[in-house]
Image (cartoon, rainbow, N blue to C red):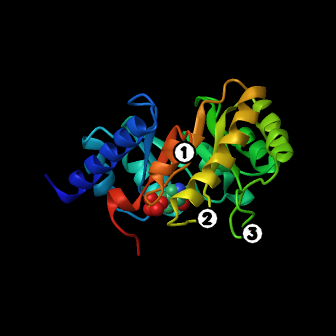
Amino acid sequence: MSNLEQQYQSVVARIRDAEADAGRQAGDVSLLAVSKTKPLCMVEAVYQLGQRDFGENYLQDAMEKISACENTDVRWHFIGQIQSNKTRPIAENFDWVHSVDRAKIARRLAEQRPAERPPLQVCIQINVNDEASKGGVDSVADVLALAAAVAEQPNLNLRGVMAIPESSDDIATQRRNFAAVKTIFDAVKQQFPSCDTLSMGMSGDLEAAVHEGATMVRIGTDIFGARQ
Ligand SMILES: *Cc1c(COP(=O)(O)O)cnc(C)c1O
């Protein structure tokens, strides 16, 4: 087994263990492999192991991989901050966007989504710790308003919420932050029952995220190795 394969299988095993520990069903939580900054050959190798969902957050870097994988069934997820002048390549090339944080971005993505493609799958990014450096909406009322703006666009499918809490080695802190995200997710889901995606948990905190109800974890480092 290659290193990459070992690392990938070990992340899959951690997710299955975390599901079992949390009393959840095997397969409840899906894995988004975050391949940002990593070469195409690594995406291909992990694809060969059965992985289909890949996350990117630098457009330039993503576009090369996306065009190389054109005739495959990879699902590309955009997870980075979105500048409003960069919405078109996202609308044209991605399947999912996890980082929608304002109505203007939602409207532009909807307008620019090609008619022949299925709707773009959208999560709203929540700012949990009020960190100015990170994008995201920080009040429940604002999240619900943005959810309504996304839901009314025919070319967008509102799927749920995404968050990147402050990184912490303390499990209690991790859980508290993820629980706060889950509370907001539940409020959104109550008004928009089509929502099924709670995107939270990264290499350092996936167990806490699964414990608090994540349905999708986004893992880069522990699959592909450290980034420069
Ligand atoms: C880079 C990134 C990840 C992956 O983080 P790791 O700690 O490398 O697993 C997940 N989510 C987002 C939004 C990212 O930018």
Q: Residue 105, can we see it?
A: yes
Q: Residue at x 56, y 48 (%)?
A: 200
Disc 3 marks which amino acid? Answer: Ala
Q: Nearer the viewer, mark 3 or mark 1?
A: 3
Disc 1 marks which amino acid? Answer: Asn
Q: Nearer the viewer, mark 2 or mark 1?
A: 2
Cβ(mark 2) to ligand 1 < 8 Å? no
On screen, residue 158 versus residue 221, left or right, reads right
Q: Which residue is mark 1?
A: 93
Q: Residue 36, can we see it?
A: no
Q: Nearer the viewer, mark 2 or mark 3?
A: 2
Q: Residue at x 48, y 56 (%)?
A: 205
140 and 211: which is toward the camera: 211
Is the residue marked by circle 3 packed among few (<14), some (14-19), or many (20+) residues within 10 Å? few
Residue found at the very far bottom of the displayed protein: 228
Find out whether the residues at labels 2 and 3 contact each other: C-beta distance under 8 Å: no
CA separation, marks 2 and 1?
29 Å
Find out whether the residues at labels 3 and 1 contact each other: C-beta distance under 8 Å: no
Which numbered marker is on residue 52? Answer: none
> In the image, residue 75 lies at what x, y percent?
46, 39
> In the image, residue 80 lies at what x, y percent?
59, 58
Residue found at the very far front of the displayed protein: 172
Which numbered marker is on residue 166? Answer: 2
26 and 211: which is toward the camera: 211
Give the mark nearest the N terminus, 2 or 1: 1
Q: Secondary structure at mark 3?
A: loop
